[in-house]
Image (spheres, rainbow, N blue to C red):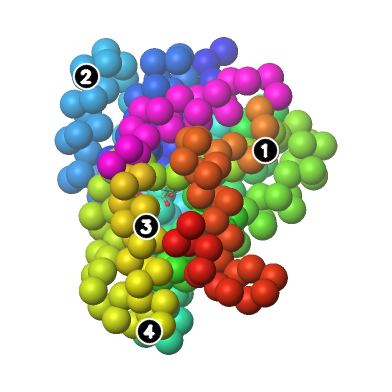
Amino acid sequence: MTRVALITGTSSGIGLAAAVQAAKAGYRTVATMRDLSRAGKLRAAAAEAGVELDIRALDVTEDPSAVVAAVLADHGRIDVLVNNAGAGHVGTVEQDSVENFRKTMEVNFFGVVQLTKLVMPALRATGGRLITVTSVGGIVGQPFNEAYCAAKFAVEGMMESLAPLAESHGVKVSVIEPGAVATEFVNNVGLDLETAIAAAGPYGDQFRNYVSRTMQSFSAAQTPDEVAEVILKAMTDESPAFRIQTSQWAEGFTGLKLADQDGSAVQKLTG
Ligand code: NDP
């Protein structure tokens, strides 16, 4: 019996690394991405690793039912779902449009909702694993990351809520919380630092310090392969933890609470 893993957002970064590592570990791996014209990097990585992947188109903001049905028809089972696809978005509720908040929720939250809903019966049938890549931004708010953190908090809340029932049906649930990972993600976020600092008003200097600390951490970021190793452990360990932070930096970061009891928000970020 070959186990089947379905992974989203595999055109680059963590998803790409996870797809290759899952295939190397013997999973029949369905590697999905929203745009198959971006499959070149994944194909090259798979060829280099000497593994085969089943690469399929899946935009997580669209109805995934046809893709899931096709995977089940072709492979007969799904043992692991890795909800990895995600996109950053920098902005504040005052500066930004409601529409941008909605779009951020569509990819990072509703993308996870609709795929989880569809795949869960298959996971129950196999006693499988439901693994979702969230972020330290899913447990601690980050300045200028309001929509993204809201979406990741929502995912964390949903997974924490459904985990006990899923486990009672034999499905183990994990959320993977990376800190900084060297992927295209940061470039795609489009942080305009000076605009953000100007908008931070009295907190401008603190925000500059925060970003410079964060960026220093990015220079010591984890690699996608390191995060993929953690995902693989969540796939294979007998009893994986529910909440898994992937880097020491992530652990340190969660110590940086934004709002203190005395209300001195952001102050602590200068630490
Ligand atoms: P990348 O930008 O390299 O990868 C993101 C992947 O998600 C890409 O394959 C992208 O596809 C895909 N994607 C975006 N929108 C959609 C969509 N609508 N449907 C399907 N796929 C989509 O970044 P990472 O590898 O870093 O990101 C992977 C996960 O890790 C995300 O959930 C992210 O939030 C999380 N994360 C990343 C951190 C980091 O520092 N990099 C830190 C914490 C969490 P396309 O190529 O088409 O754009």
Q: Which residues are magenta?
A: 219-239
Q: Residue at 26% of width from left, 22% of height from top?
A: 46
Ligand 1 within 8 Å of disc 3? The answer is yes
Residue 110 visible (yes or no): no
Which residue in the protein does label 3 denote? 87
Q: Position of residue 256 (x, y in %)?
A: 54, 56
Q: Earlier in the sequence, mark 3 or mark 2?
A: 2
Which dot marks residue 242? Answer: 1
- Could you tell me if the residues under marks 3 and 4 are in contact, i.e. CB atoms within 8 Å? no
Q: CA distance from mark 4 to mark 1?
A: 38 Å
Q: How many marks?
A: 4
Which residue in the protein does label 2 denote? 47
Q: Position of residue 241 (x, y in %)?
A: 67, 32
Q: Earlier in the sequence, mark 3 or mark 4?
A: 3
Q: CA distance from mark 3 to mark 2?
A: 27 Å
Q: Earlier in the sequence, mark 1 or mark 3?
A: 3
Which residue in the protein does label 4 denote? 201
Q: Earlier in the sequence, mark 2 or mark 1?
A: 2
Q: CA distance from mark 1 to mark 3?
A: 23 Å
Disc 2 crowd, CA 10 A, few/some/many (<14, 14-19, 20+): few
Residue 221 sits inside the magenta stretch: yes
- Could you tell me if the residues under marks 4 and 1 are in contact, i.e. CB atoms within 8 Å? no
Front tag of 3 and 4: 4
Q: Amino acid at mark 2?
A: Ala
Q: Residue furthest bottom?
A: 94
Disc 1 crowd, CA 10 A, few/some/many (<14, 14-19, 20+): some
Q: Secondary structure at mark 4?
A: helix
- Could you tell me if the residues under marks 1 and 3 are in contact, i.e. CB atoms within 8 Å? no
The residue lying toward the viewer, choosing from 74 and 261, is 261
Front tag of 4 and 1: 4
